Amino acid sequence: MTSPSPIRDGFRQHVFGDAEFWVPERYINLEPKGGGAQGLVCAAVDTVTQQNVAIKKLSRPFQNVTHAKRAYREFKLMKLVNHKNIIGLLNAFTPQRTLEEFQDVYLVMELMDANLCQVIQMDLDHERMSYLLYQMLCGIKHLHSAGIIHRDLKPSNIVVKSDCTLKILDFGLARTAGTTFMMTPYVVTRYYRAPEVILGMGYTENVDIWSVGCIMGEMIRGGVLFPGTDHIDQWNKIIEQLGTPSQQFMVRLQPTVRNYVENRPRYPGFTFEKLFPDVLFPSDSSDHNRLKASQARDLLSKMLVIDPQSRISVDDALLHPYINVWYDEQEVNAPAPGPYDHSVDEREHTVDQWKELIYQEVMEYECAHAGRSTGGGGGTSSTGSGSAGGAQPSPAGNSEPNGY
Ligand code: AMP
């Protein structure tokens, strides 16, 4: 028999390889679920709410300025945003009791079943594919309504449940993100970044449409569309398939970038019928599927447009025939969250100042939610788990797709 795990101040220790979690005793049955650059995520059961939850440990989030900014921004935004297609915060705590001892932040979220990398591998029918895309667009639109333009949507940061519901996990790049340097053993995935991000141009909301187009294309093709090893390689992959962009686009580039881009070989690109031939689409046996395949291809051809000035907007994508079968006013136009103070993104602090700022945020959260629950470590607010809108909409009055 193994000895019981240690308890300290109402927090129990759980060990996974060389990682350890200290969480309030209310959380049991912890199991590792995944990990990113920020730390490990565990599934658990909350014995107070009887809910399955995900607990993400941010280990020493203030270890360097980049980590700290990201953790602080993510925490602030998770508290602010409340939409069924954006991950919501159920609880937050630190097991350390003083600023001097402060090390780790734990964020408790609704537990989802898989990330989109896993779902992309499956043969999705049109109903599931369009429903997943619709939810992505609703989540993105909601972020935009708070002035948050994501710019870094990717399948690993989108999670789904087996009932086909979807949530975006993170808030993308801060306005000043490009200027900081991060030492991390994790390779940053850039395959889904729009041309205007790769080429360092200005951007507007439809920068996020490019990423949705890449994700949709990958669902159909079953492989990454533009898997560049670096920005240059990625740009090549884009123009080889979509063709060299127009002069109108080139003149908006910074001189050095323009010089590089204009001196690449010229590619005519392929038609969308060639890039995404009929055989790649879900079974063509019915008229319904044939119609859907042509609508899907039409939407793709409007999203995967290099020049953002000619790319479809989020609003128009939501109205596209492939997507608008799911349209629900309360989901599409949920009340905007309070405005986000972007000065956070521009702030420069030392590591020690960040440590204090993050600690204050956690303490503030714990105080605001204390008393709402029994069992240590803050509250049981479940506001994040879906409040905008009621039941899922359905095409032709059916219920949501039956799982993926
Ligand atoms: P992150 O550290 O937020 O990038 O998450 C890393 C991975 O952990 C994701 O790609 C998911 O596989 C998993 N994950 C994160 N949050 C959740 C959640 N709320 N439910 C289920 N899995 C999650």
Image (cartoon, grey):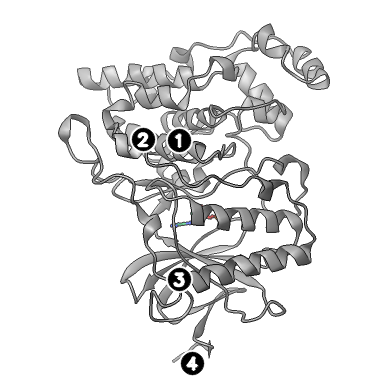
Residue 201 percent location from the top left of the image: 70, 25
Which label lies toward us, 3 or 2? 3
Of the image marks 3 and 2, the number of the one nearer the N terminus: 2
Mark 4–mark 2 Cα distance, whole angstroms, equals 51 Å
- The residue under the point 62% across, 22% down is 238
Q: Is mark 1 within 8 Å of ligand 1?
A: no
The residue beneath circle 3 is 369
Q: Is mark 3 within 8 Å of ligand 1?
A: no
Residue type at mark 3 is His
Residue type at mark 4 is Ser
Other-residue count near label 4 (Cα within 10 Å), few / some / many at <14 / 14–19 / ≥20: few
Tag 1 secondary structure:
helix
The residue beneath circle 1 is 141
Mark 2 and mark 1 in contact (Cβ < 8 Å)? Answer: yes
- The residue under the point 40% across, 43% down is 119
Mark 2 and mark 3 in contact (Cβ < 8 Å)? Answer: no
Which label lies toward us, 4 or 2? 2
